Amino acid sequence: MDEISDQLYKLNLGIKENKTSSEIQKILMQINKQFSTEGCDKKAVVEYLIKNGIVDTFSLILKSRERFSASTFALVAEISAEVAKLDLGRQTCSDPAIVVPLLELMSNNDTNVVLQVCRALGNICYDNDSARSLVKENNGVNRLIQLLRNLLEKENLPENMRTIASGCLLNLTDTYEEIQDQAVDNGILDVLLQYLMKFSSDEDVVTHCLLVLSCLADSHKGRAKILDKSVLSSLLSLLEKPLKDDIMDSLLELFGNLCENDSAKLSLAEMGLCDKLVQIVRKHISSGSVVTGTFNICKTVPDLIILILTGDASMEHLWKDGQGVVYKETLSWLKSNDENLLIAGALATGNFARKDSHCIQMLADGVVEQLRTLLEKHSGKDGDIRMQHAVLSALRNLAIPAQNKAAMVKIGIVSNLIDMMNVETFPVVFKLLGTLRMLLDKQEDVAKTVGENIDFVKRLVSWCAVEDHPGVKGEATRLLAWIAKNSKTPSVMKNLVKANALPPIISMMKSEHVVMQNEALIALSLVAVSCLSDLEEVAGSTDLINILYQILAGDIIVIELTQNALSLLVVLMCSAKLRNAVNSTPIRTDLKVLKNHNDKKIRDLASNAIQMLETSHGP
């Protein structure tokens, strides 16, 4: 540290004694040299410089514009850039005495001065709103944009000049909305597009410009301007150029950022973004290129297509009555040898299958068979989780239309789903249960097949106790209820009892969702018809009668819910033991009210229940 101390002393003394610019310059060169000395502790050097007033010293030099040469100012800016690489240095340099003169030097005729000024300001403004505010208040944004305009046509510039200037703009605009809006107002979009077109082969410059556009898209004003079709058209034309991986990655990230809302997804779909993307994937596959870095075309490009497909209007546009290029291409991915494309194909299928008419055609197109093939390869707990989740999501959607269910069952998909009972990843289990529930809706044979598989029913019961994933718990319980409702088979009812499925179904009666309460009531009524004595055994431990009473005593009467609750009550009271339990509640009062309800079924069921209670207490 002796060397830096000596040079700093000489610098301060030289300024005080009015040494010539060249003499001051030599001292600055020695200070600057410290940062490139092998084994230098840069942090210690910066801390020493700050502690000993380097900012005050530099401010004296910077305001003496007539006294010092351009080379001297360039060295001051270069050292400031090194100091500002540390957070402490950035904060210390966030001083009007440093920032304002540097901004003024941005229009200097010496390109090296301008280069070092951009380095310094870029480093000072990195994640530093106090410095950015100074830049904004002193016309710095407009100065930088004008500089970038000038650099468009200049030649024989210092190496990395455009890279440093565009990097400075990036550090200014990142997460700072006021500067983002100011930059947009000053015409930055036009400048950035010119850079992208003219320097498309310069990886650093293009990457900076794309990242700046992503920053601008974070502001309402910037996003609106970028989503203008003329701007989008220019960005889309970049995809037709030979782009390096990092540039392609940044461009796709920008498009992904823009796809925050469905209108943007539709605009990009209508302008042909997805068509260009499938061509890029196709070209990559045919070239036989091997992924060597972190960027994977077969992962990143399809991911953007999937994102656009999540919009209803954009998905419909790309569907094109089942003849769309993107739809056809994503179907072909289901036969790919690339795992990322297989998963993307399944995800695309799931998104296209958000309308019944689409699902019906997709079944005819052989999609289910292809998905089944994928599922067979990944059915166990060691299967690819992403693949399982994507395939099951698609199958669930495809199973929603009534006319698809029987056809999918005939293909044999149910056995594949049951084979997945040992899967342990809850998001996958959630999709598995939802798919099965869709397939057995009004499909008695399917419900019977599933319900008679005692091992699977026991597995369902175990999932009903999952607290870490409420979705799995809810779906498992609903599936048990649907098995009872759709099978209507005594052997299945006995299996449900044997697997201890009644407690979770009874618990579902307390759900905050009426539809789930109804499902539980119907299932229990069907079980009670076949296995009333078994219900007697679990009624006490599950508080069944009291839960049923709470439903019937509610302030708000939901017609279907009340009908189903009364139906269950009537079946339960066929048991003397359960009838006595019902009598121990204040339910008679509520039944008398319901006896006069305007719904005939409620009146009849309530009357029947009252009669059963009175008969049991007769003389």
Image (spheres, grey):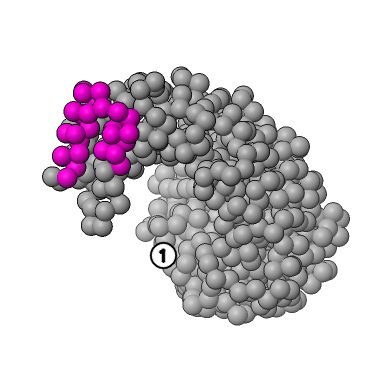
What residue is pinned by disc 1?
A: 537
- Identify which amino acid the numbered label 1 is placed on: Glu
- Seen from the viewer's position, the closer of residues 416 and 369 is 369
Q: Quadrant of residue 225?
A: top right
Residue 422 in the figure: left or right of residue 257:
left
On the question of residue 93 being in view, the answer is: no
Q: Quadrant of residue 194?
A: top right
User: Magenta part of the protein: which range?
Assistant: 3-29
Seen in the picture, residue 449 relative to 462 is either above or below; the reply is below
Q: Position of residue 111 (x, y in %)?
A: 51, 37
Q: Position of residue 203 (x, y in %)?
A: 58, 53
Residue 147 in the figure: left or right of residue 138:
right
Q: Quadrant of residue 32?
A: top left
On the question of residue 328 being in view, the answer is: yes
Residue visible at 61% across and 74% down in the picture: 290
Residue 408 in the figure: left or right of residue 564:
right
Seen in the picture, residue 499 relative to 28 is either above or below; the reply is below
